[in-house]
Amino acid sequence: MPETPHESAEPAGFAAPAEAAAERRAELAANLADVRKRIAAASAAAGRGTGEITLVAVTKTFPASDVRLLAGLGLTDVAENRDQEAAPKAAATADLPLTWHFVGQLQSNKARSVAGYADVVQSVDRPRLVTALSAAAVGLGRELRCLVQVSLDEPVPGGRARGGVAPDRAAELAGAVAAAEGLVLDGVMAVAPLDADPGPAFERLAGVAAEIRSAHPGAAVISAGMSGDLEPAIACGATHLRIGTALLGGRRAIVR
Ligand SMILES: *Cc1c(COP(=O)(O)O)cnc(C)c1O
């Protein structure tokens, strides 16, 4: 019986997505190898072991299929910055043994949703959010690990708010997290300033982290360093790197 065009086209129709997935997997594997090399070099230069550093993949704007591929490549930690995008992605990959980090500015009314899938909220920057996250964690019977986000931007009147508590208020906020039911204070997080050398800013963060740790010895996490500045972050004691572009490529305009 002669093949109809439809029948002969069918196997190709199934093969194409598999090939695309294999190609994407190879791309992510190569990027991951490059990032791991940079981490190894920066750790060696700082006299630190790579075992002290957790690589967190920031998967915002990329599909759940990429999260799955990264997990297959050995990544254990993923991060998102918007609840609308994170919630379905976490649900679509709920079968994977992943630690989910929330790293974006968070409205109090989204606290309950985020507490449903996040293991770590890195962007705790005000008392009201502590209250909301605590209530959400207690309500869900979960324990949420929290980082106090510290602003490293120079305070500019009318400047764009990028989140984060002022360094001189961070210890107080950390105390509120530590005292809140359902929350565990894990440490600090920061994003380097936009138009300044990240090194001195990460040094300031290390100072804030040390101050907080003196009162809360378990709060040992310093989340700092992104694709462009992971080396100075490692030099300043970062324990967690949040890497998007260097792992996944340029972000797309369309959010899935
Ligand atoms: C997007 C994002 C990152 C990752 O940035 P890259 O430069 O793409 O590595 C890290 N941290 C936060 C808070 C982000 O929003």
Image (spheres, grey):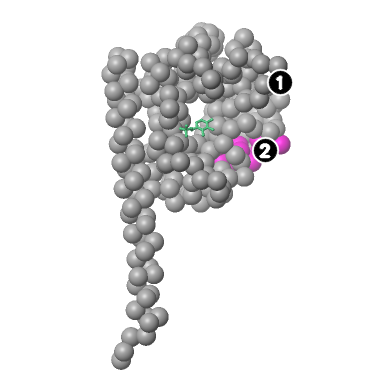
Inspect this view and state whether residue 217 appears.
no
Q: Which residues are magenta?
A: 109-119
2 and 1 marks in contact (CB < 8 Å): no
Kindly identify the residue that appears in the image at 38 percent across and 68 percent down: 14
Main SS category, magenta section: helix
Q: Horizontal placement of 88 versus 130: left or right?
A: left
Q: CA distance from mark 2 to mark 1?
A: 26 Å
Q: For mark 2, what is the residue?
A: 110
Above or below residue 229? Residue 166 is: above
Q: Quadrant of residue 37?
A: top left
Inspect this view and state whether residue 109 appears.
yes
Kindly identify the residue that appears in the image at 67 percent across and 27 percent down: 129
The percent coordinates of residue 91 (x first, y second) are 54, 49
Q: Horizontal placement of 28 versus 179: left or right?
A: left
**Three-letter amino acid code of the residue under disc 2:** Lys
**Numbered label tally:** 2
Q: For mark 1, what is the residue?
A: 158
